[in-house]
Amino acid sequence: MSRVELRIKILCMLDIVIKSALIPEKGILDIAIKDGRITSISAHVEEEARYVIKANGKIAMPSFANMHTHISMSLLRGIGADLTLMDWLQKVIWVLEGEFVSPEFVRDGALLGIAESIMSGTTLLMDMYFFEEAVAEVALSAGVRVGLGFGILDFPTKVASTPDEYIKRAEHFIKTFREQDLVFPVLCPHATYTCSPPTLMKVKELAEKEGVLIHTHVAETKAEVESVKEKYGKPPVKHLDALGFLSEKVLMAHMVWLDEEEKSIVKERGAKVLHCPESNLKLASGIAPVWEYIKMGIHVCLGTDGPASNDNLDMLEEMSTMVKLQKGYSLSAKAMDARTAIKIATLNGFTACGIKAGKLEEGYQADLILIDPDKPHLQPLYDPLVQIVYSAKSSDIDTVICKGRVLMEKRELKTVDMDEVRHIARKWKDRITNFIENLGLKPSV
Ligand SMILES: CSC[C@H]1O[C@@H](n2cnc3c(O)ncnc32)[C@H](O)[C@@H]1O
Ligand SMILES: [Zn+2]
């Protein structure tokens, strides 16, 4: 073979072939991956590949899209338990953020949170926080997709003093990260109770000018709804709609307390719901009626919320909680089946971000995981999709691939140094423990 022929052969080679994966409802098949995409799924891929993964009957499915989080809050995990949202934010979290949030905190928290996310099968995170350049840096080196937005508030923090200053930072962030491969900027006004109408409208204008998504918190607690009604004469969704804020580009986290008219408004405007059941339970906020939303045709995605209100980033667990809550809440065993739950946790998130991933089909992005079914709690394996939702644990996830890059194989992280992650967790535990002891907020160890 001449050198030219050899070069052509190498150029034409597949990047990865996954051999003998169990694809639910399709059977045992090979998956071919090139240039970040699935190029074929067939009984036997003949072409040569640079890298071969022998799946040996492991279950292949799309990776998860965690559509609402504050990833760097992993460093605050376990602090401030047993409080409702406003007490948790005002008495604990905002005090700690005021003391500790910095580019170093955000970067370190992102590394810890992204390690946990990869190990639990997530390849897309929609994040809202401060100093998001630091999250972008970690995400790019770890190889995960992130939608990132600087939180915008009306009150001053270490990051900015006025809403205009926050918006300027957010605009600069959009301009810096627009062309990045795995990172896409979004705009994040925190909520209707922390952003005035003029702030919200400036965000909306900027989002339209820059063509980016808006990601915000809406109708999380009954108390929030009452306070917004008192201030603006309308509950949060009606208030946003009256401002002309809502569109299909708006992603709204929580959406627990909506009246009937508000549900129809969300459907009409095409705004999307980011459901965070475990955080809503832990903060005693309530249960969002997402099965009803889905039946109305509202686009529902799933998120964990920050790891300090959940207290993990485990999307398998979140999915299982979501399904059981909807059945229990509606007193109907037919409410939300396992297949719909998986679609909400995977495809719906990617679609909301305009990413063609979330399905194992030719032409889709190669964002996928392999689950090891050779565990007592997954045997006998009759219906993989049902058993993924009701029986699987994130420690069963063996392999994670994002955009055709292997991020974990045989549970070994390929892009994140776990020793560094452990060191980071210890370093921040020491720093934060001193501070919370003085505040009388010591977690019960
Ligand atoms: C402005 S950056 C994000 C801001 O949101 C805070 N936060 C974390 N979890 C929640 C939640 O469930 N509802 C409202 N706000 C939340 C976080 O601590 C940051 O300050
Ligand atoms: Zn949140």
Image (spheres, helix red, strand yellow):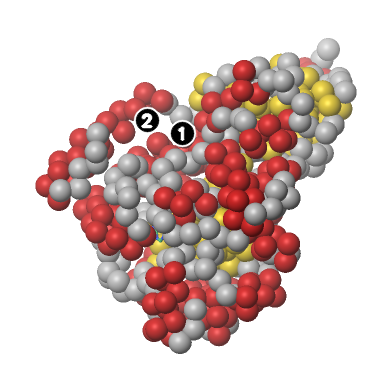
Q: CA distance from mark 2 to mark 1?
A: 8 Å
Note whether residue 132 is visible.
no
**Residue 112 versus residue 248 in the image, above or below:** above
Outermost front residue: 331
Task: Please tell me in which quadrant of the rendered image residue 248 appears.
Answer: bottom right
**Residue 90 versus residue 23 in the image, above or below:** below
Image quarter where the N terminus lies is top right
Q: Residues within 10 Å of mark 1 (few under 14, many from 20)?
A: many
The residue lying toward the viewer, choosing from 24 and 224, is: 224
Name the residue rendered at 71%, 36% in the picture: 386
SS class, disc 1: helix
> Which label number is shown at residue 115?
1
Return the x and y of residue 204 as percentages of the image width and height. Answer: 53, 75
Return the x and y of residue 284 as percentages of the image width and height. Answer: 41, 56
Outermost left residue: 438
Image quarter where the C terminus lies is top left
Q: Are marks 2 and 1 in contact (CB under 8 Å)?
A: yes
Q: Is residue 106 left or right of residue 142?
A: left
Q: Amino acid at mark 1?
A: Ala
The residue lying toward the viewer, choosing from 247 and 377, is: 377
The residue lying toward the viewer, choosing from 112 and 291, is: 291
Lower sequence index among marks 2 and 1: 1
